[in-house]
Amino acid sequence: MATETVTVRKRPGMAAKSVRDMVLSLAAVMAAGLVIYYFIPHSGGNGVHAVPYQDSVPSARRAAPYPLLAPEGLPSGWNATSVNYDGTNADTWTLGFIDPSTQYVALEQSNAPLNTVVQNATIDAVKQSATTMVNGVAWTHYQGTRYQALVLPGAKGTTVVFGTESFAKLGDFAAKLSDH
């Protein structure tokens, strides 16, 4: 039996060429990524996507069994981030904003029991002894770990103004609420 011998010769510089090719490929991919990054437009904003809420107010007012409130005359810089009227279990109106100092401020009204409305809006707020006067009416303070709230019970429903702002700023927002 004849045995054949095969000789494999390494080409000089093969490993160096592979590393060089990988580095060149990486540089090409990074260059393409930089071109895409610089030429694709970026929003440059604060990430808040404002939603129009004014068109929802009239239809929600027709459906609500209580005087439905919405802010009037908010200064510039207030952006509505959520609007919802849900009439399935209890008639609930919710309107959320990011204010000019990027704090969350919201309004919730409902004809559900007071404790249910407060807990749905604030998650875990507890009634405080303090109040804030808004247009001559005392709103009760509620303090939670995430939100604080001003609460105004009414004959046909409960109104809660809540958020991450101070009680004074929540009171300023509540003063802008109107039912017409």
Image (tube, helix red, strand yellow):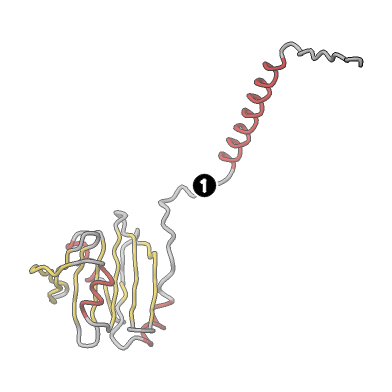
Q: Quick one: 71 or 113, which is closer to the camera?
A: 113
129, above or below 111, in the image: above
Q: Position of residue 170 (x, y in %)?
A: 22, 65
The residue sitting at the top extreme is 12
Relative to the observer, which residue lies in front, 58 or 154?
Answer: 154
**Image quadrant in which the C terminus is located:** bottom left
**Above or below — where is 21 with respect to 175?**
above
Mark 1: give few (<14), some (14-19) or many (20+) Cα within 10 Å. Answer: few
Choose top left, top right, bottom left or bottom right for residue 6: top right
Tell me the element at label 1: loop
Q: Quadrant of residue 121?
A: bottom left
Vertical relation: 134 (above or below) 36: below
Residue type, mark 1 in image: His
Residue 5: where, in percent of width, then height? 85, 13
Q: Residue 42's spot in the image, x, y percent? A: 51, 47
Q: Nearer the viewer, residue 94 or 90?
A: 90
Measuring 12% from the left and 75% from the top, which residue is drawn there? 138
Say which quarter of the image contains residue 21: top right
Point out the image quarter for the N terminus: top right
Horizontal relation, residue 33 to residue 162: left or right: right
- State the residue at coordinates (61%, 32%): 31
99 left or right of 81 in image:
left
> Which one is nearer the viewer's eye here, 69 or 151?
151
Please say if 135 is above or below 4: below
Q: Which residue is mark 1?
A: 42
